[in-house]
Amino acid sequence: MNLPIVAWWEDEAGKPHFSHGKLEDISNAGLRFKSREPIPVGTKLLLRTPMGEYVGTVVRSSQEGEEFNLGIKKISERKPSGTHVKL
């Protein structure tokens, strides 16, 4: 798949973070993407992809070289009003 994705979240201290990544896979239940930023398991994220926006929770995180493979369980989603969401 290898589509662009942007993730936003807050750390335990409430400090906002964001990361650009590559969407690897998506299903009704969740999605998988690669990020250069480590995001702890249990973190709630807002995700923007070309197919829509999603809120989810990190359920899996593993490091592969300089990237992190993240598994996300979807909580909610919103499809874009047009054909693409601007990233």
Image: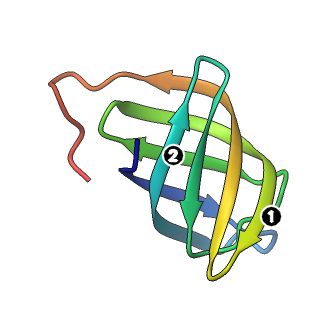
**Label 1 crowd bin: few (<14), some (14–19), many (20+), radius 10 Å:** some
Identify which residue is drawn at 66% across, 38% down: 56
Above/below status of 7 relative to 56: below
Q: Earlier in the sequence, mark 1 or mark 2?
A: 2
Identify which residue is drawn at 67% across, 21% down: 29
x then y, percent, for residue 36: 56, 75
**48 or 69: nearer the eye?**
69
Q: Is residue 10 left or right of residue 18?
A: right
What secondary structure is marked by label 2? Answer: strand
**6 or 68: nearer the eye?**
68
Q: Residue pushed farthest bottom?
A: 66
Q: Quadrant of residue 61?
A: bottom right
x then y, percent, for residue 62: 79, 64
Identify which residue is drawn at 51% across, 68% down: 18
What separation in Å lies between label 1 and label 2 (alpha carbons)? 19 Å
Name the residue carrying label 1.
40
Q: Give me the disc on residue 67.
A: none
Above/below status of 61 relative to 31: below
x then y, percent, for residue 37: 61, 75
Callout 2 amino acid: Glu
Q: Image quadrant for the N terminus? A: top left
x then y, percent, for residue 78: 42, 23
Name the residue carrying label 2.
24
Q: Quadrant of residue 39?
A: bottom right
Identify which residue is drawn at 35% across, 22% down: 79
Above/below status of 67 relative to 62: below
**Label 2 crowd bin: few (<14), some (14–19), many (20+), radius 10 Å:** some
Q: Is residue 85 left or right of residue 75?
A: left
Above/below status of 9 relative to 12: above
